[in-house]
Amino acid sequence: ASMQGALGGKRMAVGAPITSGNSTSPFGAYAAAFAPPSNSVPASTTANTAIAIPTTDLIFTDIDHRQARPGDSDQCGWSHYGQSDSLGAQPQNNTTQNGSGCTVNGQLCGATPLSPQTGFTTLDMFTAATWIDGASKQGVIYIGQICRTLAGQTYAGNGRNHVTYGPTQGPNTHLCVHGQNHYNYCNSTGDSTQTMMSALYIYNPSDLLAVARGGKSAVSVTPATDAYDMSQLVHVGAPFPQIAGSLFRYGGCWFEPQSKLLFVSETNAEGWASEGQPIIHIFSVDC
């Protein structure tokens, strides 16, 4: 009720966008409040039937205010990325990467210094979000995946997971300058990484309420629970994966307040008739 009053009757939209290289897109969580327009509201322009809906930011991230992330993955790359040597070869296209950054002709050598990735990358993403509303606990949760160095994995180079920008070098091969294969998490030419962890984030509604009342900036809101490993949540049935199987792993989530059950859709979790089918994971929430 206090949230409703602070928002002047507006509805809260919990955003779970996929981040991108677009400077105006969120780099992390986003949430806003809005008032749905009535059917009588005219279109914003005569060129289409779209209606501009004013929003009030409650959680805000962008390229200049990236959400913080654990610094256990390193950013890496080629110091001569995109440059051609005297024979036309480019170092990032090598089918073998040995850390030198040289082209196959031994020219244009150099790898950029490794640096811990502490802000959201274009691969870190939320694809599901919902509001938990119980008698004793309330919260805004986001579910997604984040580039992480995970136990039990082998990483070329310095033994940590790397995030890099580069092309696909062959079938099932997307190498970073240190030889890590990022094929499972890449989009043709673009950012890529070797492992991504299925992650849960929880935001305190009191922070959103403070923003709505003007006592806190939407940019300053941080999660109360940050990058929690979703596979650690106990539930019956198919295990929830620690390592996300691919990009865009989760299709959505929904909380049912009477039964206090949280439903999470894991896309392409099962193969059936040559097509990937989703699994719906169900968690009981103590709230």
Image (spheres, rainbow, N blue to C red):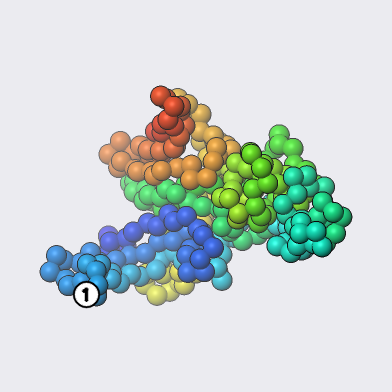
Q: Is residue 164 above or below residue 230?
A: below
Q: Amino acid at mark 1?
A: Thr
Residue at 37 percent across and 49 percent down: it is 130
Residue 42 location (% of width, % of height): 17, 72
> Split into 4 quadrants, where in the image is the C terminus?
top left
Which residue sits at x=40%, y=38%? 265
Identify which residue, 139 or 137, lies in the foreground.
139
Task: Please say if 78 is above or below 253.
Answer: below
Q: Position of residue 251 (x, y in %)?
A: 41, 43
Q: Position of residue 76 (x, y in %)?
A: 73, 56
* Total labels drawn: 1
Q: Is residue 177 left or right of residue 50?
A: right
> In front: 187, or 51?
187
| Residue lying at the far front of the rendered structure | 87
Residue at x 16% of width, y 71% of height: 41
Instruction: Decide which of 47, 261 is in the foreground and name it.
Output: 47
Question: As drawn, is 167 to the left or to the right of 95?
Answer: left
Mark 1 sits on what residue?
46
Q: Could one spot residue 110 in this view of the protein?
A: no
In the displayed orientation, state which residue is furthest to the left.
40
- Displayed quadrant of residue 112: bottom right
Quadrant of the image containing the N terminus: bottom left
